[in-house]
Amino acid sequence: MEKRPFKEGWGAGAPPCPGVLGSALGWSLPRGRLFLGLGDGDPGVLGWACRCFPPRQGVGGTVDHVSTVRVHQPLPLQTIKSPPTLRPPRRRSGELGSSFIHLTSTRPGLIRDHKHHLRHHRQCCSGKELVDWLLSAGLAVQTRSQAVGICQVLVDGGVLTHVKQEWHFQDKDTQFYRFAELELSPEPGAGPRDAEELLEAVAFLAQLGPDALLTMALRKPPAQRTEDELELIFEELLHIKAVAHLSNSVSAAAVRLLPPWRVLFSQGDKGTSWYIVWKGSVNVVTHGKGLVATLHEGDDFGQLALVNDAPRAATIILREDNCHFLRDVEANTMRLKEHGKVVLVLQKNLQGGSSQPATARSSRYFVMAGTPEKILEHLLEFMRLDATLYDPVDTLLGDFLLTYTVFMPTSQLCRALLFRAEPLEGSEQEKATYSLHKRRKILRLVSQWVLLYGRLLQGDRSTTALLQNLADLASRDPRLGGLGQEQGWPMGRHPPRSLPPWPQAQSSGNWLTSQEEAILSSSCALRAQDKVPYEIYRPDHSCLITVLPVNASVRDVLRSLAPRLGRDGEHVLVKVNSAGDKVGLQLDAVGVFTALGLNERLFAVRVEELGSLTPHPEQLGPHIGSSETLDLISSKDLASHLTDYDWNLFKSIHQVEMIHYIVGPQKFHDVTTANLERVMRRFNELQYWVATELCLCPEVGRRAQLLRKFIKLAAHLKEQKNLNSFFAVMFGVSNTAVSRLAKTWERLPHKIRKLHAALERMLDPSWNHRVYRLAVAKLSPPIIPFVPLLLKDMTFIHEGNRTLAENLINFEKMHMMAKTVRVLQRCRGHAHAPLSPLRNRSPHRPEDPKAVRISTCSEQSLSVRSPVSTWAYLQHLKAIDSQKELLRLSRDLES
């Protein structure tokens, strides 16, 4: 669901919502059947209707006439009273309140008598004073929002009360609060509180703060919700598993209250909505068969009646009192038809919040679906001459350029652009006006296109022809001269016959610059035609090396090795992992070497040798750990080296690689996903390396020290915003083979165990990794994100939404994919400053043992181990990737 329509609906019509997040907080909820739904048209809707499924029929039109728009107006709202306060367990509230009262006693004058509007309020403090004190008390409270969240938790728990019994904490001088006295006063004879205990209490309150703020925002009347609160509600709904990766077509929201009966709809009813079970469960009952299924959280039902325009095929009965659903109906859509066929589907939205007057808001149509040519035509029609790839508001240009290869070959795009550069009919003056207007936009689009793809377009004949034609037009038409020079078009020159390897400057004949290419050129990015050494093993474990392009096919590999393999039988290329599992590779498969996983090898064998093929000894991993080597490197320096290495890998990934990886590189011509696969392989290598080192350390004391180092390493990685390696190290520490080593964990200091518990909270996968997503949203670049989660998001988007529907491109899916891909651009928004002494070292180049560098690492590390050898060690980590073997080693250590 887009943020603008959501804010308008919730700001204008959504009522207070008790119990929306109660189950997540573990608090008691009011009884009753409260539903989060998407308006249906029946009485009792407490929200607004949003578009879901396009109309099954519409008024036709020509290219110049748009079909009529069917609009569902928001339904009238029912009013309900503010819900009761959701309170955490009283015992826990008392403990926290007692600690908090002790804290306030350290600040004389905070709690005092106040006079406001001729009224006296005894022994209280203002909301603003309480927030100011929290920020200045050295309690690790960083922002006012975090402090307000802590206070809201205390208000919800009855520890802090408003002088007028209001349930909404406000950061204002005119709002006064006092602490409850019953059961909260310090016990007689109780000594001073331990500082660590007090900090722990505040940390616990801060952890509950975001949920308390969200619950408070949902309970407020619509007119009182601020823009920040609407944005908070929107972001939280995106973390719900059932709707996290669905498009606008199936994820708009409003709130409704069901009547007292337990039947949602009956068999034979007309279908008007599609439902997703958010919380609770329902029974599916049919005539004659009775109960046929039970649906739980995340399941959906009701779509067949909409798709087939048929009556409901079953009766849905609630199994629980407190069930939540999401549902959707059709809203503002329009369809453009040509020759009786739909060619473009648009959605009408209002820009700006509902708090703005109608005159301050402007209408705009967003592309939902269409043919490739019509989507391009719409883009050129409404694109601004200053449009950019990363415009935060108008994303159509960026969405199209990032994803066009999914539904439109480059040659088709070039033909369409050349076709639209020439007017077809009209007077000479009309043609001239059309040409100038359209060509300016085409030049802008092409400049942004090459800005994004750079050398990825090199060697494509259709691209070269397009650039040649556009350069000719720009050189002949003086009215395009200014724009052409702004875009980097050298007047009077033609582009080279093939795209240059790297645009340098106008004087050298290179006429377009790629910022993405600039990022990649400073790293060790692999491209499809780059030549790399292929290591191919034989059944006797001897190794053959041949140098081939990254995208070489299996047929090319076998052909290059044919002289050395001999002619005694037909050879096949097989991928073998450490467990001995074999996968035969098709002759047309490409990029097989860079796609190898951890401890996988390629073997060239005859068919009759497959049965006796065994893994190479190196694939089984090390037999001796390297704890002595790790003892010579501090955890902070280790994190710095890892971050610098990982940053080189991460910035090598081109944005479109993620799309190619998820859709399947075999569906594209001459592309590679080697850089992304290299990052994924490194993630697996790092997590198994951590588990391997711990399981290969025989002494329990040394093992406890090593475990302590890895936990501190994870903390430093998180501090350096290297979240990909942070997750890898934490996964390694959480491996079953490590977590069962009870004697080792017992030897950890209490402070380290608490640090591990705090770090482990980031791994919480509930609510679609909500903790991680909220943490990343607060970070500023440069960041190395958790790449596997990005790929998971992309996979859900790709597999959960069809690319082609009714012969139209589902462009809403393209928008969601582009939005996820833009995370890479945001994370790389600022250049990374290397923390280790080996700055900007290419990760796959061999180490020069004679190299001398000035180190910025700690003196302790430098005195015992050189940065060069540390870097070389981290480049070639050895790990056991067999969980069975790791568990065997773990049992040998502590049976």
Image (spheres, rainbow, N blue to C red):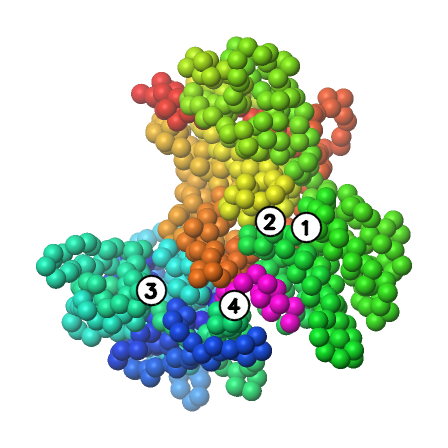
Which numbered circle lies on residue 453? 1
Q: Quadrant of the C terminus?
A: top left
Tell me if residue 109 comes above or below residue 70 in the rendering.
above
Does label 2 or label 4 sit earlier along the sequence?
4
Q: How much space separates mark 2 and mark 4, taking CA atoms?
A: 26 Å
Label 4 belongs to which residue?
343
Tell me if residue 62 comes above or below residue 183 in the rendering.
below
Label 3 belongs to which residue?
307
Q: Secondary structure at mark 1?
A: helix
User: Is residue 17 among the parts visible in the rendering?
Assistant: no
Does label 3 or label 2 sit earlier along the sequence?
3
Which numbered circle lies on residue 656? 2
Q: Residue at position x 30%, y 58% from top?
A: 300
Does label 1 or label 3 sit earlier along the sequence?
3
Where is residue 803 drawn, in percent x and y?
47, 55
Q: Residue at position x 68%, y 56% from top?
A: 414
Callout 1 amino acid = Tyr
Q: How much space separates mark 2 and mark 1, taking CA atoms?
A: 8 Å
